[in-house]
Structures are given as structure tokens and as C-alpha cells.
Image (tube, helix red, strand yellow):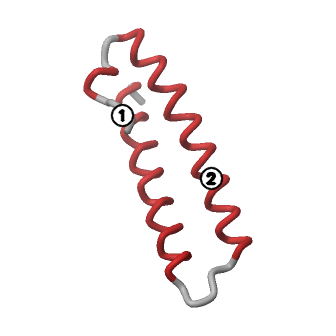
Amino acid sequence: MKFSNRYDALMEKHRRIEAKIAAEIGRPLPDPFVLQRLKKQKLRIKDAIQSRHRRLQGVGFASQYALT
């Protein structure tokens, strides 16, 4: 898998987990263990995105993939 394709896949996964967290928080009684698990997943993916971003900077692709 190309660097940029993997980066895009990680960004999409990060967005999906953010949506799951928002949905869980929106429930009448959010499950704290589910939230904890989702937040840990989100942090692992964020670390992978930042690592990929640093690699892309060396290749010259990072300018089109700015982290916000």
C-alpha cells in the first residue's frame, strides 16, 4: 500500500471512531468502558497518523495532508 493511501485510510478510521465516540456520548447512559476503549483506539490511530505524516514530509506529500 502506498504511503498516501495508508495515510488516507488512517484518517478515515480516525473520523469513524470520532463519530462512534460522539454517538456513545449522545446516549442517555454512555458506557464509560466503551468510551475508554474508543478513545484509546483513537489515540493509537492518531499516533500512527502523526508517524505517517512525518514520513510523508520526507517524501514531499505532507503539504496536501495537513493535520488539523
Residue occupying image coordinates x 54% and y 26%: 51
Callout 2: 10 Å neighbours few (<14), some, many (20+)?
Answer: some
Amino acid type assigned to the residue bearing label 2 in the image: Gln
What is the distance, in whole Å, between disc 1 and disc 2 at their CAs?
20 Å
Q: Position of residue 42 (x, y in %)?
A: 57, 51
Compared with 1, 18 (above or below) is below
> Decide: marks 1, 2 in contact (CB < 8 A)?
no
Q: Position of residue 17 (x, y in %)?
A: 50, 59
Element under label 2? helix
Amino acid type assigned to the residue bearing label 1 in the image: Asn
Task: Name the residue tied to disc 1.
Answer: 5
Q: Position of residue 14 (x, y in %)?
A: 47, 50
Residue occupying image coordinates x 41% and y 44%: 11
Q: Nearer the viewer, mark 1 or mark 2?
A: 2
Q: Seen in the image, is 13 located left or right of residue 39?
A: left
Q: Where, by quadrant of the figure, is residue 44 drawn?
A: top right
Residue occupying image coordinates x 42% and y 30%: 1
The circle drawn on residue 30 is none
Element under label 1? helix
Extreme left residue here? Answer: 64
Extreme bottom residue here? Answer: 28
Callout 1: 10 Å neighbours few (<14), some, many (20+)?
Answer: few
Q: Where, by quadrant of the figure, is residue 24 drawn?
A: bottom right
The circle drawn on residue 41 is 2
Residue occupying image coordinates x 41% and y 9%: 58
How many circles with numbers are drawn on the protein?
A: 2
Compared with 62, 29 (above or below) is below
**Picture quarter with the C terminus:** top left
Q: Earlier in the sequence, mark 1 or mark 2?
A: 1
